[in-house]
Image (cartoon, helix red, strand yellow):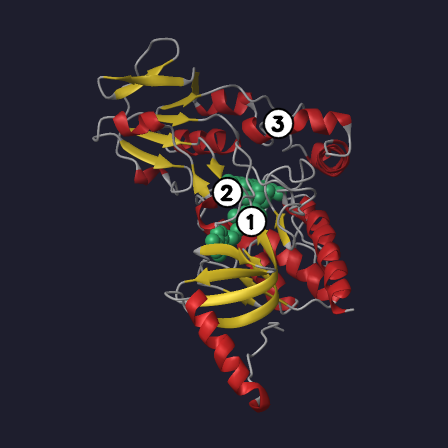
Amino acid sequence: MSGATPISVPRSHSSQLLEEGAAFGELTRGRAPIAERHEVVVIGGGQAGLSVGYHLQRSGVPFVILDSRPRIGDAWRERWDSLRLFTPRRFDGLDGMHFPGVANDFPTKDEMADYLESYAAHFRLPVRTNTRVDRLSREGDRYLITAGDKQLEARRVVIAMSSYQRAVTPALASELDPAITQLHSVDYRRPSQLPPGDVLVVGAGNSGAEIAIDLAQHGRCVWLSGRDVGQVPFPVQSPTVRRLLLPFLFRVVFHRIVTLGTPIGRRARPTMITGGFPLIRTRSGDLSAAGVSRVPRVDGVRDGYPLLADGTVRRVAGVVWCTGFNIGQSWIDLPVFDRAGEPIQERGVVPNEPGLYFVGPHFLYSASSTMIHGVGRDALYVAKHIAHASNLARR
Ligand SMILES: Cc1cc2nc3c(=O)[nH]c(=O)nc-3n(C[C@H](O)[C@H](O)[C@H](O)COP(=O)(O)OP(=O)(O)OC[C@H]3O[C@@H](n4cnc5c(N)ncnc54)[C@H](O)[C@@H]3O)c2cc1C
């Protein structure tokens, strides 16, 4: 089910259409001709896009999903080799299909990738891989989607992706001595990518802490720089915690309490968007046990080396920037971002661009919005909104 409508020209209208076609030609000069028209185009075929697809399919709304990567699940496959999810399998399934295996184990990132691929196959979701959208714009009540030499048109578009699309690195990175190997966490796979010598990991959130431990366990001297983001107040690795407390943390706290529907959630949102989550699986004791030393934030550069807020200089061979991401909005030619670069939306519905939706960004509606177990609720809300709008339009 791709939802593509072939464009046919009834013979009796051909001359009138020729004129309209010429006018259209004027309008679209220099642009590839519209190849397809769709009711809904979902951009992004990770967990967010597949969840939206699942719920649209159940509502009987035709759609197509476009994804830039070669294989479904590649966003997970491309993460570092030793990565395991911090959510146990029982919280790693999307609506309609359990994640296989022992419920309280943490799966590998490749298992997650394969699960997404089998999810799309199981529900026969129409995903087109290797299709990067270069531009999204609007003309009248239609969205125009340019992907390479293809032009698609859609009545509604869902931008379905996490806020982790474009790596963010501080400007001072460019002032470091070129002899220092620098990687962003998005490009980090394994310790051997870095030359022998000490490593500074900048950013002490979940990714920074886990990469620091990965490096230390491979014999590197590792400094972890950045603000202490705190940690969940119990050891997630413990079997009792996994069985009893994690359901409370993920399904009650992150999914039901810390939402835009509660005062506590509204207060927490700005901090969670800028500061991220507390450490979930890694504990500060794990860092010291692995030999990782905590140091203050990087404040500048001296003699080509990172200068810390306490005035010390770290003469390291490598730096791993775990300094976050943003949604990478350059291809979205629509005024739908606020000054901080966050999508302007209400539960995923963009008020000033009718027919446009977001699913997947951090804290869209709740702390769980960008997590696997939480994305389904946002996807369902948006799919219902689309189904309702499509039904109204058909009447
Ligand atoms: C290191 C790390 C570990 C995480 N661990 C967990 C965990 O344990 N548990 C949990 O619940 N959550 C976890 N998350 C959070 C979240 O589940 C993941 O980030 C997840 O990948 C988000 O899925 P998504 O579909 O929203 O976005 P993504 O996985 O980022 O997928 C978006 C897709 O859209 C495609 N795309 C982007 N731009 C375009 C474009 N212009 N045109 C076409 N396609 C495009 C991308 O290629 C990608 O395939 C983790 C996040 C990170 C960064």
Between disc 3 and disc 1, whose residue precedes?
1
Residue type indicated by callout 3: Pro
Up-down relation of residue 189 to residue 279 (above or below): below
Task: Report the amino acid beneath label 2.
Answer: Ile
Q: What whole-number distance in Å separates the C-alpha atoms at marks 2 and 3?
A: 16 Å
The residue located at (46%, 42%) in the rendering is 82
Q: Are marks 1 and 2 in contact (CB under 8 Å)?
A: yes
Asked if residue 322 can be seen in this view, the reply is yes
Q: Is residue 388 above or below residue 266?
A: below
Q: Earlier in the sequence, mark 2 or mark 3?
A: 3
Return the residue nearer the eye: 282 or 56.
56
Coordinates of residue 53 in the picture (x, y in percent):
65, 61
Which label belongs to residue 161?
1
Above or below: residue 285 compared with residue 366: above
> Which residue is pictured at 55% across the width and 28% down the height?
274
Q: Quadrant of residue 138?
A: bottom right
Judge whether residue 234 can be spotted in this image. Answer: no
- Tell which of 299 and 335 is nearer to you: 335
The percent position of residue 178, horizontal first and vertical second, equals 21, 31
Q: CA distance from mark 1 to mark 2?
A: 8 Å
**Residue 279 rendering spot, x and y as whole percentages:** 58, 28
Residue wearing tag 3? 270
Give the numbered dot on residue 196.
none
Query: Residue shown at 67%/52% (left/top)?
Result: 93
Looking at mark 1, is its residue's CB closer than 8 Å to ligand 1?
Answer: yes
Q: Residue furthest top?
A: 311
Tag 3 secondary structure: helix
The reply to whether the C-beta atoms of the residues labelled 3 and 1 are less than 8 Å apart is no
Identify the element where label 2 is drawn: loop
Kind of residue indicated by mark 1: Met
| Residue annotated with mark 2 | 327
